Structure formats: structure tokens, C-alpha cells
Image (tube, rainbow, N blue to C red):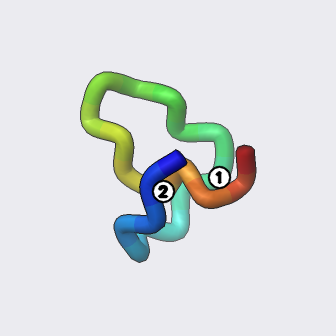
Amino acid sequence: MRLTGDPSPGNMNSSGSGNFLL
């Protein structure tokens, strides 16, 4: 889980941006 601030729920990519939903 990475709270990056990117509004992309379910974005479980290697970028890890928007992984706040999980």
C-alpha cells in the first residue's frame, strides 16, 4: 500500500501510484 496521492484506486502496477484502496 502506497499513499502517493494519485487518484487511481486498484492501480496495482509496479509504479505503486494510487494504491490507497487496498
Residue 3 on image: x %, y %: 46, 65
Q: Position of residue 12 (x, y in %)?
A: 51, 29
In this rendering, the answer to whether 6 lies above or below 11 is below
Which residue does the numbered mark 2 point to in the structure image?
A: 18
Which residue in the rendered view is the most extreme toward the top? 14
Going by the image, does 5 lie left or right of 20?
A: left
- Single out the residue that lies furthest toward the right: 22
Q: How far is mark 2 from mark 1, CA to CA? A: 6 Å
**In percent of the image, x 26 and y 36: which residue is there?**
15
Residue that extends furthest to the front in the rendered view of this protein? 1
Left or right placement of residue 14 versus residue 10 in this view: left
Q: Residue at 36% of width from left, 67% of height from top?
A: 4
Which mark, residue 9? 1
**Residue 17's mark?**
none
Chain-order first, disc 2 or disc 1:
1
Give the quadrant of the C terminus: top right
The local secondary structure at tag 1 comes to loop
**Residue most toward the left?**
15
Dot 2 alpha-carbon crowd within 10 angstroms: few under 14, some 14 to 19, many 20 or more: many
Could you tell me if the residues under marks 2 and 1 are in contact, i.e. CB atoms within 8 Å?
yes
Residue 11, compared with residue 18, is above or below; it is above
Residue 13, horizontal then vertical, whole percent: 40, 26
What's under tag 1, amino acid-wise? Pro
Amino acid type of the residue tagged 2 in the rendering:
Gly
Look at the numbered disc 2 and give the secondary structure of its residue.
loop
13 in relation to 21, above or below: above
Please report the residue visible at 37 percent of the width from the left and 51 percent of the height from the top: 17
The image position of residue 7, as x and y in percent, is 52, 68
